[in-house]
Image (cartoon, rainbow, N blue to C red):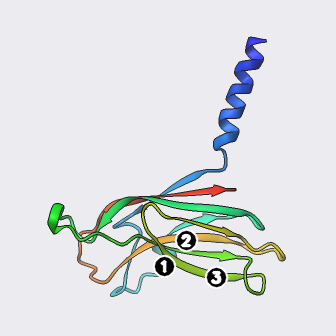
Amino acid sequence: MRRTSILLAVFVAIAGTAFAEQYVVDADKNCVFMTQSARVLDRAVKVKLSMNTRYRVSLEGEAFFSNQTGADADPMPGVIIFYATGEQDGFASLYRVLKPGESLRFTTPGEEDHNVFLMAFVMDYWDASANTGKYVLTVDKE
């Protein structure tokens, strides 16, 4: 009986967290500089999503356009999120800046067989800046 209880507790713990995944969006590594010709796909965090599924995406952390701290810090406003939803005619590509503490909910397309994903990155103008910090992007199936 005790072994069954332990196995059940482990299963419940794993099942309760199985759908939440976290991804690090690094202020330097995942930055698309407007003055360079690097493609977004080369710099962004890419997350494969399931069709016809409801997701909640949230963001925590902080990142800066320099290595300065305190009153001189130049904070990034958040992460650019590019994703597909089942809105409009059944498939809409959308983007938004997700700020720390905010969340986004959407349902992926489900009518046709598509390769749906989410991309997350930060953007900066000056490619010589020493961007620091990171964001943690949490993707939950609802």
Q: Give neighbour class at mark 1: few <14, some 14-19, many 20+ (Cα, 10 Å).
A: some
Q: Position of residue 89 (x, y in %)?
A: 77, 87
Given the current orientation, which residue lies at the most extreme right position?
A: 111
The residue sitting at 45% across, 60% down in the picture is 101
| 8 with respect to 139 (left or right) | right
State the mark number for residue 40. Answer: 1
| 59 with respect to 5 (left or right) | left
18 is higher (above) or lower (below) than 79: above
The residue sitting at 36% across, 72% down in the picture is 77
Q: Which label sits in the foreground, 1 or 3? A: 3
- The residue identified by callout 3 is 93
| 94 with respect to 113 (left or right) | left
- The residue identified by callout 2 is 119
Earlier sequence position, callout 1 versus callout 3: 1
Earlier sequence position, callout 3 versus callout 2: 3
Query: Which image quadrant is residue 91 in?
Result: bottom right
| 128 with respect to 54 (left or right) | left
Q: Which label sits in the foreground, 3 or 2? A: 3
Given the current orientation, which residue lies at the most extreme top position?
A: 1
